[in-house]
């Protein structure tokens, strides 16, 4: 009886996965037609699965945040921008942040900043005073402690989006991601005017929040990604392949086919997310606390090239206000 159930499940899963593969095939054809033959985005997508040293020469998208030409650039509230990577821009879970123009802390947060200079002691015999040689300076971590109160389901959705966003920024690109192997995205910190936080490139190194047992919780209906649902089919199909391999060790060819379909469906989900296709599905109801507090630790990061081009004279004179990213 168990074997019959397994085979029935196999038929349904393979049929569903095949339908998803056909759907994305049509999407790929539409993309190819829309961008014309040869090169461009369609050509880049065909190169997604090339091994190392065989990838496309240029980036189709970058995972760094972009905050230029923002209509809210003069907004002095503390804000973390959304990365330009398509999944961050099209995720139905992150829509409240997309509408707000990033993660804006709704209540005035407490922010701890630091700046340090390291000097190395030079040991010299028979001297009363040690000599110090400058070694390096460090902008230090930025710690944001922010209250996040929720009064209605709309604010509850914003709370969920904020948590999902901060969790996502501590994850690297891996698995079936088109940019597998890349570190978590860089975001821009702005707040309190140009001479405090102006487009400071940061990575999230730590996020904490306490779900208190001494407050009420509000039920919030949320949505999920249809592309994510397709990926769920892929995961189930891959698990089914392992089950078939365990029950019918002699039909390795069948399990290989099922596994191949699972991998294809995973690529379907990635491709759908890349173009914001697939719409949304019900994510059920989540419950959020009416009173909580976020603690976010940010680490400013600068490329070797930007550090090399830094000028202290220009920094002191406030000459970096028009820079696409800010030194602190």
Image: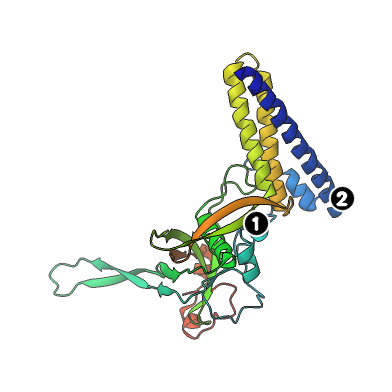
Circle count:
2
Left or right: 114 in relation to 280: left
Does residue 259 sit above or below 309 in this rendering?
above
Residue 288, how many percent across, how many down? 50, 60
- Would you call the spot at circle 2 few (<14 residues within 10 Å), some (14-19), or many (20 or more)? few
- Look at the image and name its color scheme: rainbow
Q: Secondary structure at mark 2?
A: helix
Q: Nearer the viewer, residue 102 or 282?
A: 282
**Residue furthest to the bottom:** 317
Dividing the picture into quadrants, the one containing residue 85 is bottom right
- Can residue 285 be seen? yes
Residue 91 numbered tag: 1
Residue lying at the far top in this picture: please name it: 250
Q: Position of residue 263 (x, y in %)?
A: 66, 35
Q: Which one is nearer the viewer's eye here, 62 or 285?
A: 285
Residue indicated by mark 2: 33
Could you give the CA–CA distance between mark 2 and mark 1, rounded to whole angstroms?
25 Å
Q: Nearer the viewer, residue 193 or 324?
A: 193
Q: Picture coordinates of residue 290 (x, y %)?
A: 47, 65
Q: Looking at the image, can residue 36 be seen?
A: no
Which quarter shows the N terminus?
A: top right
Query: Which numbered marker is on residue 260?
Result: none
304 sits left or right of 11 in the view: left
As helix, strand or loop, the secondary structure at mark 1 comes to loop
The answer to whether residue 249 is above or below residue 164 is above
Where's residue 267, x and y in %? 69, 41
């Amino acid at each position: 009886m168990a074997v019959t159930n397994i085979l029935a499940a196999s038929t349904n899963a393979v049929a569903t996965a095949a339908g998803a593969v056909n759907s994305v095939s049509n999407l790929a054809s539409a993309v190819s037609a829309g961008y014309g033959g040869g090169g461009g985005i369609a050509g880049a997508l065909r190169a997604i699965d090339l091994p190392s040293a065989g990838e496309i020469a240029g980036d189709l998208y970058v995972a760094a945040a972009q905050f230029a030409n923002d209509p809210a650039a003069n907004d002095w509230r503390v804000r973390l921008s959304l990365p330009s990577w398509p999944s961050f821009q099209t995720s139905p879970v992150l829509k409240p942040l997309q509408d707000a123009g990033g993660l804006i802390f709704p209540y005035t947060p407490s922010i701890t900043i630091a700046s340090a200079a390291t000097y190395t002691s030079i040991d010299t015999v028979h001297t009363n005073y040690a000599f110090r040689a400058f070694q390096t300076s460090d902008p230090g971590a930025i710690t944001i402690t922010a209250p996040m109160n929720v009064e209605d389901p709309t604010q509850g959705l914003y709370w969920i989006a904020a948590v999902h966003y901060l969790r996502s920024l501590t994850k690297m690109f891996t698995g079936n991601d088109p940019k597998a192997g890349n570190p978590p995205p860089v975001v821009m910190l702005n707040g309190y005017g140009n001479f405090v936080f102006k487009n400071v490139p940061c990575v999230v190194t730590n996020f904490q929040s306490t779900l208190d047992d001494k407050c009420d919780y509000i039920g919030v209906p949320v949505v999920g990604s249809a592309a994510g649902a397709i990926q769920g089919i892929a995961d189930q199909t891959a698990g089914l392949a392992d089950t078939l391999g365990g029950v019918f060790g002699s039909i390795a060819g069948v399990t290989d086919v099922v596994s191949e379909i699972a991998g294809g469906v995973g690529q379907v989900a990635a491709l759908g997310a890349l173009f914001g296709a697939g719409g949304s599905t019900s994510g059920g109801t989540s419950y959020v606390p009416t009173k909580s507090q976020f603690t976010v630790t940010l680490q400013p990061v600068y490329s070797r090239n930007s550090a090399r081009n830094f000028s202290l004279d220009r920094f002191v004179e406030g000459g970096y206000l028009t820079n696409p990213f800010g030194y602190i």
